[in-house]
Amino acid sequence: MNKPAHIFALALKELTSLRHDRVLLLFLAYAFSVAIYMPAAGSVIGVHHASVAIVDEDHSYLSRQLPAALLTPEFQAPVPLRYDQLDASMDSGRYTFIIDIPPHFQTDFNAGRSPTLQINVDATAMSQAFMGAGYIGRIFGRELLEYRTRDNDAVQLPITLVTHSLFNPNLDGGWFLAVIQIVNNITILAIILTGTALLREREHGTLDHLLVLPLTPFEIMLSKIGSNALVVVGCTWLSLEGIVRFALGVPLTGSVVLFLSATALYLFAANSLGIFLATLARSTPQFGLLAIPVIIPMLLLSGGSTPLESMPDWLQWVMQMSPSTHFVSLSTAILFRNAGFSLVWPNLLALTAIGSVFFGITLLRFRSSLSS
């Protein structure tokens, strides 16, 4: 048999072993379904459907116009509230925001006396309270400016700024979070699956059986990388189509084929890293301890959790050596911005170079661990 036949036979062995591992199959199903859907659908980054009540003590045109500017999906329709109900409503937590418009608000505003209105915020709803108060302030400021300039040509602004959000018009954080969650799960599984597969064979003595066969470390490594990459790429495609596009309704405008090709290239590097860690460990628990300080920085510093531009310059340079940094950039560019090969080839080239280096170093380490 030649090398391709050896690699194909070993890959079939890996897939057969995975097929009989029900716990691992259940974990794969969870990682690419529930673990994607729940964070993206249940975690709201920003203000969404916030409850608002209005205490209108002015009963003027302006006091009616301001609440009307609070629109869905950020805010619910404002509910009228009497002044004597304000404290009880805040104590009960029924509303996140209660806005108190004082008497003579429009009269004082027209007279240039800079009146104030009160926004009561239930700060127990932390994410919505902090951002929502800022939203309300900007919305009211815009409405008051339009009201003042409508009848006063002397203060008309020379220009009007209109903001258009590209690729995510409603700034829905769930869209981005769903894709990043897939990227993070790919990283975790790529390292864990190959590393534990190698250690399981060593602990069960299967690796010793392979060594007496006419097989090389290169063939053993490549079969493990290829079989695990095939499984993860298949699960990624099912998750993109079934969970992200269908269940969550995220419009993926880019080429899924190009993204899956980039995923396979990324898995080449990440799987090599997993095998390298497995050669350093002597048991599965030890491998888990080694994997944690490697996986966590790859997830947190790759640009998926926080923008890479917000990090110190030296850390940005260091993270360029991590394949996850380039994969995060590739994923968002392809799936959301419809970037083609002509735009993402530098990242693909970087993944190829990093993967080749990881594979070469891991192959040397794997050979030395087999001979020892």
Image: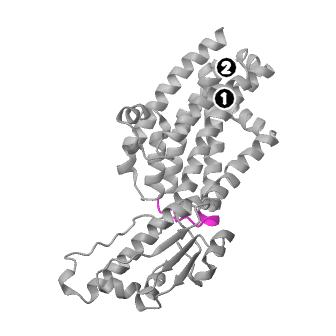
Q: Does the magenta stretch include residue 250?
A: yes
In the picture of the structure, the residue carrying the numbered disc 1 is 195
The residue drawn where x is 56% and y is 34% is 270
Looking at the rendering, the stretch of residues picked out in magenta corresponds to 245-254
Q: Where is residue 220 in the image (x, y as percent from the top left)?
A: 65, 25
Q: Which residue is drawn at 26% across and 84% down?
A: 149
User: Does residue 216 sit above or below 343 in this rendering?
Assistant: above
Label 2 crowding class (10 Å Cα cut-off): few <14, some 14-19, many 20+? some
In the rendered image, residue 215, in percent from the top left (x then y), is placed at 66, 20
Mark before the other along the chain sequence, 2 or 1:
1
In the rendering, which numbered label is found on residue 281?
A: 2
Residue 43 in percent (x, y) is at 61, 58
Q: Say which of 55 and 359 sits in front.
A: 55
Where's the N terminus, which quadrant? top right
The answer to whether residue 80 shows anywhere in this view is: no
When the figure is inspected, residue 16 is found, relative to residue 255, above or below; the finding is: above
Q: Residues at badges 2 and 1 in contact (C-beta under 8 Å)?
A: yes
Q: Is residue 111 left or right of 299 when viewed as pictured?
A: left
| Local SS, label 2 | loop
Q: How crowded is mark 1: few (under 14 residues within 10 Å), some or many (20 or more)?
A: many
Q: What amino acid is found at the position of numbered circle 1 in the picture? A: Gly
Residue 9 is labelled as none
Q: Is the magenta stretch mostly helix, strand or loop?
A: loop
Residue at 63 percent across and 18 percent down: it is: 280
**Who is closer to the viewer here, 164 or 23?**
164
**Local secondary structure at mark 1:** helix
Is 180 left or right of 369, judged from the image as shown? left
